[in-house]
């Protein structure tokens, strides 16, 4: 079956938002006098769901707030941080999305909230390229559960055999695989040590991934 749709992750795949997530967590942790350097934090928590990160931090540092509450505060803080620090696009993101939109249906499938993702998509003029957007708010079970990708496939009305997911983390890869999708993983500096052995393809950039899709489709 030929490829009809491409389902893109957001953070780490299309935008380099790790620094913004880190800065947001720093603000949340500041009242507890907890400081973690950026490289250490991003290497551990890149692609890890916000709630899970909150629980880990709460337990590790015996914080007085619950992990869920910490995650909620971080999500709100991210919105504030993004007002003055827009994440940069990953290399080739705009060109690849534009080219892909001419040949495939596109979905954005992200663990970010609507309030986190939409301003960035609008800022870069990318929202109009997607046929559907599935954010964390839109599902009961976010990544690594398969529900986000299942919902996107349903909205696109495309069978799994005719779609490919593009991810950057083990969490996202797990979600896509559990949904029955073939996967392209594009590791970055903070996720490159994660286990991607179950990915269909590994690529070093979005540009290479696009060439792979054209060849495979």
Image: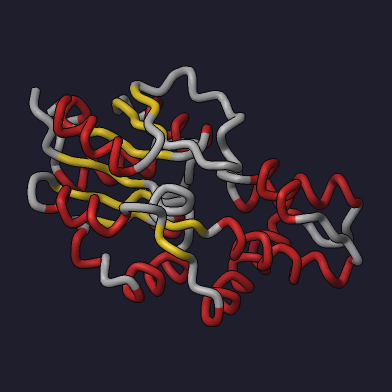
Q: Where is residue 2 in the image (x, y as percent from the top left)?
A: 8, 27
Examine the image and state in which quarter residue 179 appears: top left
Rendered residue at 72%/61% (across/down): 70
Rendered residue at 81%/55% (across/down): 36
- Up-down: is 189 above or below 67? above
Rendered residue at 58%/79% (across/down): 80
Examine the image and state in which quarter residue 79 appears: bottom right
- Up-down: is 167 above or below 85? above
Q: Compare residues 16 and 61 and report the one nearer the observer.
A: 16
Q: Where is residue 200 in the image (x, y as percent from the top left)?
A: 34, 21
Q: Position of residue 52 (x, y in %)?
A: 66, 45
- Up-down: is 89 above or below 119? above
Which quadrant holds the N terminus? top left
Which quadrant holds the C terminus? top left
Q: Where is residue 48 in the image (x, y as percent from the top left)?
A: 60, 43
Question: Does residue 109 appear to the left or right of 78 in the view shown?
Answer: left
């Amino acid at each position: 079956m030929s490829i009809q749709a491409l389902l893109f992750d957001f953070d780490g795949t299309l935008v380099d938002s790790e620094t913004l997530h880190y800065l947001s967590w720093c603000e949340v942790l500041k009242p507890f006098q907890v400081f973690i350097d950026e490289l250490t934090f991003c290497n551990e928590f890149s692609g890890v769901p916000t709630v899970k990160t909150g629980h880990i931090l709460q337990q590790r540092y015996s914080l007085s707030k619950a992990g869920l509450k910490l995650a909620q505060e971080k999500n709100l803080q991210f919105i504030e941080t993004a007002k003055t620090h827009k994440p940069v696009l990953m290399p080739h993101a705009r060109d690849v999305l534009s080219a892909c939109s001419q040949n495939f249906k596109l979905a954005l499938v992200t663990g970010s909230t609507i309030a986190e993702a939409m301003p960035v998509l609008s800022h870069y003029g990318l929202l109009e390229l997607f046929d559907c957007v599935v954010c964390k708010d839109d599902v009961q079970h976010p990544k690594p559960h398969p529900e986000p990708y299942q919902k996107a496939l349903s909205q696109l009305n495309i069978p799994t055999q005719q779609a490919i997911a593009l991810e950057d983390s083990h969490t996202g890869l797990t979600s896509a695989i559990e949904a029955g999708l073939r996967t392209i993983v594009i590791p970055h500096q903070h996720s490159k040590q994660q286990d991607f052995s179950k990915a269909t393809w590994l690529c070093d950039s979005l540009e290479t991934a696009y060439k792979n899709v054209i060849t495979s489709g």
